[in-house]
Amino acid sequence: MAKTKSAGSTAWKTIVSVLVVLLIVVLLAEFGMRWFTAKQVKDQFHASAEADGIEVSEEPEVSFGSSPVIFGLLSGEISQLNLHTPSTLQINGDVITGQPESTIEMEGMTLSDDPVARHMVATTIIPEDYLLVTFQDSIANESGVDMLRDVVVTDITANGESGVLDFELGGGLATISLRPSAVNGQMELEAIDSTLFGMTLPEQATQSISEGLSKGMQDQFTGDLTIEDVTIIDGAVSIRISGDNVNFNDMNNQMSQTVDAVEDPR
């Protein structure tokens, strides 16, 4: 009986040892896969910055949640991917290169040449000087008159304390203060105050200006995605957007058209 118990105990120890070894192998494989995938994402970020002639001092941050990445790779879908990229923006006159600071959270991202995320939430920090150039570019493109680029909207100040964007028009001839918000997935700009030659503008004129600027921000920064939140901080605007079944190739093409228009405004 003692010999039988000893044999059974030895067999159990052997099984446990094998399971431990297998667990270590899986953990090492999981660690290696996370490291490799994160490295690929970081390398792509640096390659994109270098293509724009930008030196990056900060590293992007990549994480994958609690679900095993290795199983996701076998099934062709990563269950969760979180990515934070530092700003690579460089603004020279009316030419913009690089991208603003962003934090992206994706769920159910397919691994293919045409990747799609079942759900995505992205928060982007847009500096006021970036806002100014994109507004000026939009005005020039829509009007077809390039000389209007620098004379309609001449300055934008993001005031975090009051939560408004202060627009200077015509070099100070007129001003308008707008408070952005997210309403039914769209951006709205509420006119708080407006003046012309120091005199308050009529409500109808103020409303027309705010609607035009609101459409400009919606088209430039969010496209077809849903706007969840807009927050003014000192010197910048934080916009959180979301979408379901987001096709990254389509989104990249859409954003590239906007960036190309700003990088080569003429």
Image (cartoon, rainbow, N blue to C red):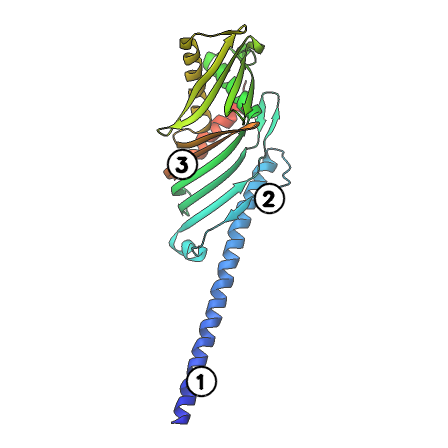
Percent from the top left, x then y, of residue 230?
Answer: 45, 30
- At a point 47% along the width and 76% down the height, the residue shown is 17
Q: How crowded is mark 2: few (under 14 residues within 10 Å), some or many (20 or more)?
A: few
Number of disc labels:
3
- Judging from the image, what secondary structure is the residue with disc 3 in? strand
Q: Nearer the viewer, mark 3 or mark 2?
A: 3
Find disc 2 in the rendering and name its residue. Answer: 59
Find disc 1 in the rendering and name its residue. Answer: 10
Q: Which mark is residue 242?
A: 3
Against 248, residue 4 (above or below) is: below
Looking at numbered disc 2 in the image, what kind of residue is underneath it?
Glu
- Judging from the image, what secondary structure is the residue with disc 1 in? helix
Looking at numbered disc 1 in the image, what kind of residue is underneath it?
Thr
**Earlier-in-chain disc, 2 versus 1:** 1
Q: Which residue lies furthest to the front in this view?
A: 161
Percent from the top left, x then y, of residue 79?
Answer: 40, 50
Q: Which of 211 and 38 is in front in this view?
A: 211
Against 223, residue 118 (above or below) is: below
- At a point 47% along the width and 40% down the height, the residue shown is 104
- At a point 48% along the width and 36% down the height, the residue shown is 123
Looking at numbered disc 3 in the image, what kind of residue is underneath it?
Ser
Q: How crowded is mark 3: few (under 14 residues within 10 Å), some or many (20 or more)?
A: many
Percent from the top left, x then y, of residue 56?
Answer: 63, 39
- At a point 40% along the width and 89% down the height, the residue shown is 5
